[in-house]
Amino acid sequence: MQQQSTMYAVVRSKLYEERFERFRVGQAGTLMSVRPGLAGVSTRVCRMLEISRGGACFSVNTTIGLPLHYYLAIVGIKKRIGCAELFRKENRVEVHFIKPIDEQLLHEIVRHEFFTGEAVKKH
């Protein structure tokens, strides 16, 4: 299957060229977008794979009908993060954040994953 890129994959911008440290996470999240004609809000469940100050990578059940811009809400985190899609391939989506998140929020997300991630159970 061919990878679908958006204009954000080729547009030169300091925000998009800046590199941030990426962290592997496995938290659940929700993608929220406004339907065409302001006909309501649609939501879709996702699973976070990686996150940095400038963007994230996550998996969804299907990318059919998923717009190019939406908000990401991560379970256990109060803020919504505006996203612009960079590319999608099969069920994997990578986005740039509209505005980089601050270090404190990134720390909260990674720390939350550390404390809520599935631990190995001892018998």
Image (tube, helix red, strand yellow):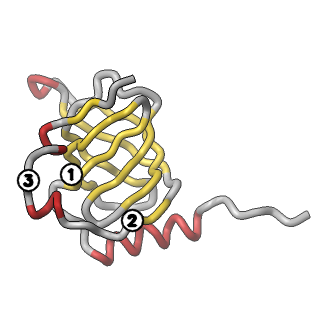
Checking the image for residue 97, the label placed there is none
Residue labelled with disc 1:
82
The location of residue 44, given as percent across then percent down, is: 38, 34
Q: Give the secondary structure at mark 1.
A: strand
Residue labelled with disc 2:
22
Residue found at x 34% / y 22%: 64
Q: Is residue 68 left or right of residue 55?
A: left
Residue type at mark 3: give it.
Answer: Arg
Report the front residue among 67 and 33. Answer: 67
Distance between the Cα atoms at labels 3 and 1?
19 Å
- Residue 50: which quarter of the image? bottom left
Distance between the Cα atoms at labels 1 and 2?
18 Å
Q: Nearer the viewer, mark 2 or mark 3?
A: 3
Q: Residues within 10 Å of mark 2 (few under 14, many from 20)?
A: some
For marks 3 and 1 on the same chain, the one whose residue lies earlier in the sequence: 3
Residue type at mark 2: give it.
Answer: Arg
The location of residue 15, given as percent across then percent down, is: 13, 62
Residue labelled with disc 3:
12
